[in-house]
Amino acid sequence: MKMAFRPTDSWRWYFDNEYDSLMLEISSEMLFRCNYASKILIPDVFDEFSFSVDDATAYYLFYDSCQSLALSDSQKIELSINAIVASNFLKPQMPKSWYFSQQPMLYNPKVADIVEVNLQESGQRVCLLVVEAGENASLCIIAQPTFIAMNKTFYFSEAIKVMNDRLALAQSFIKTENATALDNEQLELKAIS
């Protein structure tokens, strides 16, 4: 069953001092607590304000992009809302690209692209969602469960800025129609030989 979760003009952002967190009030019975610590948020978030038309547009952009990921519907919603917060309300960050290997080809990401990086130590692929595409570096959020790199734990929806030369369009996390057709062709060829 698909979750019916659509932005409305009654949604509102506010900062909760008790939890030291930006909250999104969905309804009187439902609150969403954002992942990011207050120290990395811009000062504008400490007032109450409505969930804007731009926020709703961004929500659908990010949510549609997440459909190809192997996540539950609630994780896709969480990722999409945290992507809005990261793109609109985080203070500027410096790239932390040393965790990841340089890619053989330069990729120019776009907002809402699902990208992958390879961990410097193990070569393991990690899936990210681009929330702000820059000329040289892009702000991304982790689009998979927790992983460890260089003794640091990275969590689902955590924001990290990465140099574009470390990013590649995700292929191991996404099944496109062409990739499925190619897989089927390869299976048929194996069956023949």
Image: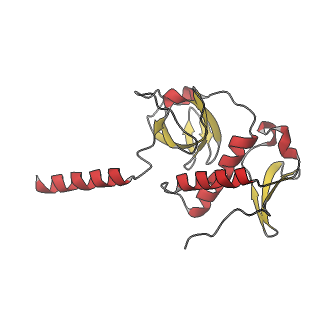
Q: Is residue 191 above or below residue 152?
A: below
Q: What x and y, as percent, mark residue 34?
A: 74, 51
Q: What x and y, as percent, mark residue 9?
A: 77, 62
How many marks the image carries: the answer is 0
In the visual, does 118 lie left or right of 158? left
Q: Residue pushed farthest bottom?
A: 1
In the visual, does 44 lie left or right of 115? right
Q: What x and y, as percent, mark residue 193?
A: 10, 52
Q: Nearer the viewer, residue 65 or 91?
A: 65
Q: Residue pushed farthest front?
A: 53
Quadrant hosting residue 23:
bottom right
Q: What x and y, as percent, mark residue 141?
A: 61, 43
Q: Is residue 176 above or below residue 110?
A: below
Name the residue located 41 percent from the left edge and 28 percent from the top edge: 105
Q: Is residue 11 above or below residue 83?
A: below
Q: Nearer the viewer, residue 100 or 128?
A: 128
Q: Residue pushed farthest left?
A: 193
> Which colour style is shown?
secondary structure
Quadrant hosting residue 93:
top right
Name the residue located 68 percent from the left edge and 53 percent from the top edge: 81
Q: Nearer the viewer, residue 44 or 142?
A: 44
Q: Is residue 88 above or below residue 99?
A: below
Name the residue located 58 percent from the left edge and 27 percent from the top edge: 135
Q: Quadrant of the N terminus?
A: bottom right
